[in-house]
Amino acid sequence: MDPGPVIQRRPARALTVTLALMAGAALLAPLGLSASSGLDDHVDDEQASDLVLSARRVIVRPGEVLEDAKVLVRDGRIVQVGADVKVPEGAEVLEGEVVCAGFIDAWSVAGIEPGSVRADEANSATLASDALDAFDQRPILDELVEAGVLLARTQVGVNAPLGGFGPLIRTHAVEPLLADAAMSARVGIARGGSGFIQQVGPDGSIRFIQAPPTVDPIDRVGQVDKLVGELEDAEKYLLDRAEYEAELATWAAEIAEKEKELEDDFKKAKKARDKKVKEAEEDGEELKEKRYREDKRPKEPRFDAEKAALARVVDGEVPLVIHAERALEIRDLLRLTEKFGRLRMIIAGGTAALACADDLAARDVPVIVTPKPSEPGGPVGQLDAGLALAAELDAHGVEVLIGTGASTAMASRDLPLLAALAVGHGLERDAALRAITLGPAQAFDVADHVGTVERGRQADLLLLSGDPLSTSSRVLVAVSGGEVVHRAGE
Amino acid sequence: MLSLCILSAASLWAAPAEDTFALRATQVHIGDGTVLLDAFVVVEGDKIKSVGQSAPGDVRIVDVDGQIAPGFIALGETTGASGENRESARKSTPLADLSHAFDPHHPGWKPLVAQGVTTVLMTADSSRIAGGLATLVSPARGEVVQRGVALTLGLSSRSLSLTEEPTSYAGLYDHVTSAFEGAADGSPLARARAGELPVMIEALTRMEVLRAAGFAKEMGLSGAIVGAPKADETLDVLRDAGLGVVFEPLRPGGSDDVVDSAMALAEAGVPFAFASDAASAGPAAIRMTLGACTRGGLDAKTALKAVTGSAAEIAGVGDTHGTIAGGKAADLVVWSGDPADLTSRVRAVYAAGELVHEAEERGAGR
């Protein structure tokens, strides 16, 4: 079966209304969102590919549950959801306790050829989708699918200051659903930080936290400044391009006007010129003609792939995921990026993000949290909330996403366990489910296609034996792009 | 801001030592795979007095909001030992008492207690052939519970080196065989041969497991293999040797086959338990491993049994620990849901009858 169409970002701007409308129509057609896509309310014609998931609870989106409902899947899409869905003749019916959207790992290296994961030479123009490997990674990807992790936002160059564009992939098909889901960057991270350090609380109590990673302070300032500097350069590049395009348009309009004049009154213009030539000959001179405006074509700024890539980020077209752990870097990033009005920043890691929680919430900056069993789950502090980080950020109004931290591809398999761990340390179940379904779908601009169990969405679904995050329940069936890609016990 | 609080040990220990009270819960997990509904756990001093559908009329009754289970028992932990469990100059120190490596004040203990672990078996470094006698400790109370619980043997490649004998498996087994055969009466090795002292044998590959199990059978040793990858493939040999298995914790993204192995062992009736190894894997690793196993299909009751009743049996302390039964240590944890489920929260931890950890629901202090 067709794994489903690839989504493309709609160009941000710079196109005329007509062009944008045309592009829009061209994009909508393959996504099946036009009127002819079979999304009419009346669905009764039987089709060989029909699939029905039937469950006691269908979680349409976190917090919105339909009891005793069915989901009808046809041609890779969800075409009906509800209690009164009629099962078409010949449809395969699969039953379980719960249906929910497939899990999305917001921070992963799944499907990426391992050598590229730590490619230090990555830059902003790198396309991680070039490093996708559907062959050697197969056994790992199968485990992800079995665990219900059907989508992942992946990246390369996890240690590079800039890792380039990372795709959102279907883990089963290893094909990008969106090739440029996010740009990735990294600041202030260094290795180390093992063991515990002692901290005296405001009430004089002594507690112990895991030692934070260390980095040279000069390097740290340099890393944040360098990233912000590159964003500034990209913004300038963007403005230069915009200026050039405006000048080009003016010039082209002038030329067109001249040409129209010529066309409209060619004879008159020729006569006038001939007269001038004759007069010049009589004076024994050569005619000095007015210089052609063609020569005054505005000069195009030199193309720079890296700046052009970052320009899309500064312009807000593509979100920027920055791996930053400490409060120092996060605070600096928030302060120094405030001037980029359109930039959509996402913090990944954020061990100490709680110290900046209010600013993160005010600026609508989501945080991708990786709950780690190595973190203490007991005392909560401003600098290191440990396993309670996701719950605490959520309570402060920060959008929490859960990701497995781009360490290894196999780590993505444990995404539902990490989400469960966050629930076990205070995060509400709905918020945790959102953090691995709708949350990342929205953050990476694919919420119109995946992330919920709604009519018209692509069918990336799970059928489970119980609550999606309870470790006592199992993934019975996984459906990726409408195709049943896993059945428990097979 | 502080949404979780740990009551200070000092104020708790001031409570009357012989306080008798009963915890009442909708579900009490005994630790042997069974569950009592609407039951009382009566605690007298540091022991459980009784468990059942009723409690004596004169005791204080505490209604708990959640499910009660025995405190988790972690086999294989070196928190705070910082090398004190490793006699680096000698590879065989069977008399070494690991209680000397125990640091009751180490910061690593509190986070472990907050995950529901009330009892820990501190073991010798596994690179020692006979590293010494494991000791049972209570991390919450900072106490040694029982010394000389089990003998730690390292029969893996970690005990071999190029510069120091033994340098080969043959040399390793020559060493342990002569040590066991020549052991003086009453010594740990002789007691292990007599079945009085369980052994914890580290073996890290399939071949090492087969060698170790064969050796244990020949010497008449009882206990468990620690590590035991692909235990599902060595089932018959393990069962034949009468050994259990202690699994190392799963690291996130780890490709170990703990889940498949645990399910195969459960089906075959071979006892198994889990190491916490919190010093390197983190305090929540033991719960994460349980969660991975249940998510993979292991029955939640069997998973709970592995970290309670079975763990106590494997360590040879089943008479005093591991299940909720009259006369056993009052090590109890109140969970918000199923104790083996990773989404459940630890509400309260009792160690030897004392409330040593209590979690407030987040936001309560705001």
Image (cartoon, coloured by chain):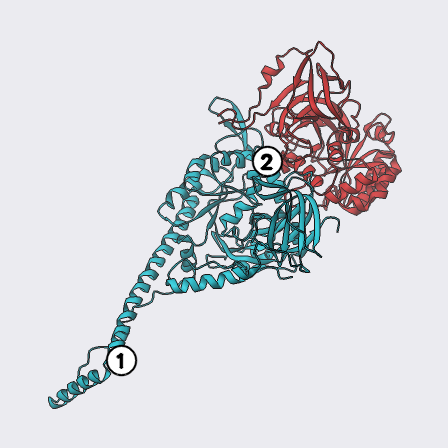
Chain colours: A cyan, B red
Q: Residue furthest left?
A: A283
Residue corresponding to mark 2: A423
Please tell me whether mark 1 sits on a helix, a strand or a loop.
helix
Whether discs 1 and 2 lie on one chain: the answer is yes
In the image, is residue A332 above or below residue A88?
A: above
The reply to whether callout 1 and callout 2 are in contact (CB within 8 Å) is: no
Residue corresponding to mark 1: A263
Q: Chain of mark 2?
A: A
State the image coordinates of residue A34 (x, y, percent, origin top left).
51, 60
Q: Is residue B94 visible to the viewer in this orientation of the structure?
A: no
Q: Is residue A169 visible to the viewer in this orientation of the structure?
A: yes
> Mark 1 belongs to which amino acid?
Glu
Q: Quadrant of the N terminus of chain A?
A: bottom right
State the image coordinates of residue A99 (x, y, percent, origin top left).
64, 45
Which residue is painted at 37% across and 48% down in the image?
A: A341
State the image coordinates of residue A137 (x, y, percent, origin top left).
65, 56
Q: Nearer the viewer, residue B47 or A14?
A: A14
